[in-house]
């Protein structure tokens, strides 16, 4: 009989073998008591190795766990409690008592709202008319002021016009006297 | 040992070991170094503890490993796998510690001789309940591992406890894969001999049940 090597059995025990090879070795184990006994011993020793256990010395990590784990648990409990309270209050309490209370206070609230609305409306109207009156008064004042300014401009323009006419007449007289000495002046002053 | 799911997800969305180490190497990035320590301190501490048989010593050696990683960050080859480099440093420190002990003929005070441990396990009146028996058996395994030759112990610890593949161990130790498997077979054979008395004391089905219900401490 052709026996598998020890190296092959190690791959078999630690499962580093493809399926066909594994099937071949499994079949061999059924036919060969010698190999079966040897492999059984190795597997038992391998299993026994797991008896040695120890905890890793992570003092910082373990102390963090000691303090943070209860904190997280309490926080989660608080969140769940708050959520449950909200749902209960939101959907459970709005029942008959709430409806009766609403029916009792509804007319009064409506009356108050109506009065407040009316008061507000009157106040708004008064304010609106007052603003209009103020605007009209301002406009009239502006017109009066404008008329005064226009009158002033007209008077000044008239005076300037008269002055210019006199200056032109004077200029004509002076020109004629220079061209025809001894002629009488036509300018009427 | 399998890494937790959260750690796997973290490594999936975070920096890879090689990227983090590159940052440590080129930018002295302390956050990347902290991430590496968080990721690897457990496996390294386990390895050093299994290799030396002493949990306190394992803790110290793990710390020293990361101190050495930082001190030698410029020596890291970015094209290599970070984990291989890290395992090598931790293994070398463990070997140094074992040699130091051998030179001084110094062993942990709480590590009894393997044969006396065997006698302890075989004495029924000293194993009143299941958990105490399991503890005693664990102690016996620890002592038996200390009696294995260094090469066999290394392969056994890396394959059985740290769940590295034979191919990865071969790469880590610069050995042919066949040699690694051969050493593993030698280690299991030697462990079978050392554990024989203990195994005879407890039926195989009880061992299996115990194995299945054991607490996962690691």
Image: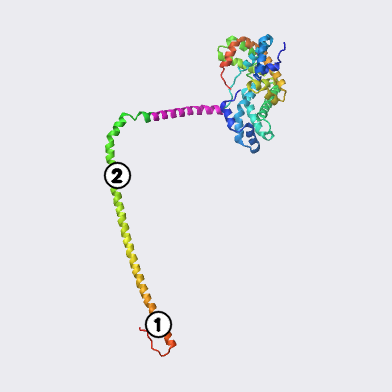
At 64% from the left and 10% from the top, the residue drawn is B197
Q: Quadrant of the C terminus of chain B?
A: top right
Disc 2, SS: helix
Q: Is residue A49 left or right of residue A104?
A: right
Pick whichever of labels 1 and 2 is earlier in the sequence: 2
Residue A117: mark in rendering: 2
Q: Measuring from the top left, give residue A151's x and y in whole percent.
A: 34, 69
Which stretch appears magenta? A60-87
Question: What whole-number distance in Å separates the C-alpha atoms at marks 1 and 2?
Answer: 79 Å
Taking depth in this image into account, of B93 and A8 the one nearest to the observer is A8
Residue B186 visible in the picture: no
Taking depth in this image into account, of B102 and B201 the one nearest to the observer is B201
Q: Chain of mark 2?
A: A
A82 drawn magenta: yes
Q: Based on the displayed image, in which of its 4 quarters is residue A105 positioned?
A: top left
Q: Residue tagged by mark 1?
A: A170
């Amino acid at each position: 009989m052709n026996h598998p090597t020890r190296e092959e059995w190690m791959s078999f025990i630690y499962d580093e073998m493809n399926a066909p090879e594994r099937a071949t070795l499994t079949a061999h184990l059924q036919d060969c008591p010698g190999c079966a006994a040897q492999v059984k011993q190795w597997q038992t020793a391998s299993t026994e190795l797991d008896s040695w256990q120890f905890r890793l010395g992570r003092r910082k990590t373990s102390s963090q766990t000691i303090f943070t784990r209860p904190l997280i648990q309490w926080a989660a409990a608080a969140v769940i409690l708050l959520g449950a309270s909200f749902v209960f209050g939101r959907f459970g309490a709005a029942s008959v008592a709430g409806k009766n209370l609403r029916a009792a206070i509804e007319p009064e609230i409506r009356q108050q709202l109506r009065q407040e609305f009316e008061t507000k409306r009157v106040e708004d109207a008064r304010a609106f008319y007052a603003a209009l009156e103020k605007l009209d008064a301002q406009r009239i004042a502006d017109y009066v002021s404008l008329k005064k300014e226009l009158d002033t401009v007209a008077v000044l323009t008239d005076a300037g016009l008269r002055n210019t006419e006199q200056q032109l007449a004077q200029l004509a007289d002076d020109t004629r006297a220079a061209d025809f000495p001894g002629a009488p002046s036509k300018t009427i002053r | 040992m399998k890494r937790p799911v959260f750690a796997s997800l973290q490594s999936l969305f975070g920096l890879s070991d090689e990227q983090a180490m590159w940052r440590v190497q080129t930018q002295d990035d302390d956050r990347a170094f902290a991430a590496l320590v968080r990721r690897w301190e457990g496996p390294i501490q386990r390895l050093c503890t299994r290799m030396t048989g002493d949990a306190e010593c394992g803790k110290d050696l793990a710390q020293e490993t990361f101190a050495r990683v930082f001190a030698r960050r410029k020596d890291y080859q970015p094209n290599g796998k970070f984990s291989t480099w890290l395992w090598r440093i931790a293994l070398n420190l463990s070997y140094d510690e074992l040699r130091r002990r051998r030179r001084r003929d110094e062993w942990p005070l709480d590590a009894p001789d393997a044969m006396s441990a065997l006698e302890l396990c075989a004495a029924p009146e000293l194993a009143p309940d299941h958990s105490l028996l399991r503890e005693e058996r664990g102690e016996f395994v620890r002592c038996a591992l200390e009696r294995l030759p260094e090469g066999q112990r290394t392969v056994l610890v890396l394959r059985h406890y740290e769940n590295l593949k034979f191919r990865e161990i071969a790469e880590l130790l610069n050995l042919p894969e066949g040699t690694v498997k051969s050493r593993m077979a030698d280690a299991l054979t030697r462990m079978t001999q050392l554990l024989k008395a203990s195994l005879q004391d407890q039926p195989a089905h009880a061992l299996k049940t115990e194995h299945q219900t054991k607490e996962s401490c690691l």
